[in-house]
Each structure stands twice: as structure tokens, then as C-alpha cells.
Image (spheres, helix red, strand yellow):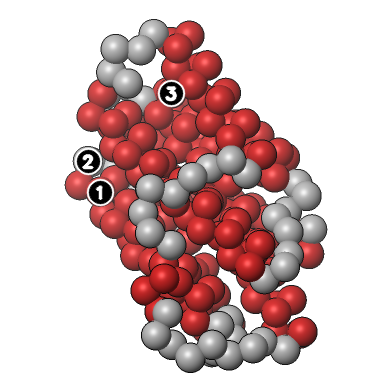
Amino acid sequence: MQNLSTLDRLLAAAQRALQTVSGQSIASRPYPPLAVTDAPPVALSESERRHAAALIRVDHVGEVCAQALYEAQALGARQERVRAALERASREEVDHLAWTRKRLEDLGDRTSLLNAVWYAGAFAIGLLASRLGDRLSLGFVVETERQVEQHLLGHLERLPAQDHASRAIVAQMREDERRHGLAATELGSVQLPAPARWAMRLAARVMTTTAYYV
């Protein structure tokens, strides 16, 4: 995308936004549960199914937000190497979107009814982060991925032990988020001020609590 004009980038961003919100994202890597097919299938109780689906719905919303954040930050990046890194991470996050959506379908549940709202809000935050300059924008990536990694670890602890498929997805997502944070650090990120980190945690708590139900 190095030779695209600003208009081209905006049109491409609009197309990806529609794909994200409409659920048309396609993974480029294998579905993680395929790697655990040798695990004996265990039926979940109805309460376990609902709980697992709610946690995966939260994770799906997180990936909707990740797409919006990366898209906006890439649009506002000053250096081409930073933009390329953000776009590369965004492509991997598309896999997470597709995986969590498929898992929700397998569990007989739905994605959040507020995905368009989540996307719009995250896109605005990403644009604001990009206006602060590449180093602070990368710092935003590092802090976001750190919080997401902790959040996913919490989900691994809360998912039913016998839900091998969901656990395989969340484990792979956690590893990817860790790598994205490390990549942003290597590109020269700076740590965000404490108030910004606190605000991010508060916003994440509102999102995760709401998306669990809606």
C-alpha cells in the first residue's frame, strides 16, 4: 500500500470497516481448534455454553476494536515503516476476527449488537493516538496489547476446562498480541502517561462488561 494516495487509503479503510462490522473477514491462517481435533469432544452444559459464548463475544468485540485502532493509526502514521508494521499487525488481527466469529457460530450464539458503535469509537481513539506522533502511537499499541494479553489470560482461566476449541483460539490470540506489542516496542515506542493508561483500562472494562451481554 506504499503507493496509495490519501483518497485510496480512505476508501480502503472504509471497505475494511464494512467487512469488519458485517462479519465478512476471512482468516489467512488455519482455524486453531483444528490443531486440537485429537482431544475427545466433550459436550458443554447450557450454562457453560452461554458463558463460553459470552467470553468469545467479548473477544470478538476486542478484535473489532483492534481493526479500527490499527486502521486509524496506520492512516495517521508519519513513517512508512510504522504504517507497514501497523498494517501487518492488522492483517493478523483479521484472523482473530474470523476465528472468534466462527467459534460463536459453533456455539450457537451471536456477535455483539453494538459492533458498529465499538468500531466507530475505537477508530476515533486510533486517530487521536496517531495525532500524538508515531512514538506515542506505538506506545498506545504496546499498552493496548499488554492489557489485551492480560484480558485473554483471564479468559483462559474462566473458560470451561473442557472447551478445547475456545481455549485454542484464545491461546493463539494471546501469543499474537504479545508479538504485536514487542514489535511496537522495537519500533521505538514510548510509555503512555499513567492517566492515559488508567483511562484505557476504564474504557476496556466498560466494553468487556457490556459486550458480555449485548
Name the spot of residue 176 as percent of width and height, x first. 35, 58
Q: Are marks 3 and 2 in contact (CB under 8 Å)?
A: no
Q: Is residue 2 left or right of residue 47?
A: left
- Which residue is at 74% across, 76% downward? 50
The quadrant in which the N terminus is found is: top left
Tell me the residue that label 3 is attached to.
75
The amino acid at mark 3 is Leu
Name the spot of residue 204 as percent of width and height, x first. 61, 56
Tell me the residue that label 1 is attached to.
183
The amino acid at mark 1 is Ala
Q: Would you place residue 9 above or below residue 30 in this image? A: above
Residue 167 visible in image: yes
- Judging from the image, what secondary structure is the residue with disc 1 in? helix
- First-in-chain label (3 vs 2): 3
- Judging from the image, what secondary structure is the residue with disc 3 in? helix
Q: Is residue 141 left or right of residue 124?
A: left
The amino acid at mark 2 is Leu
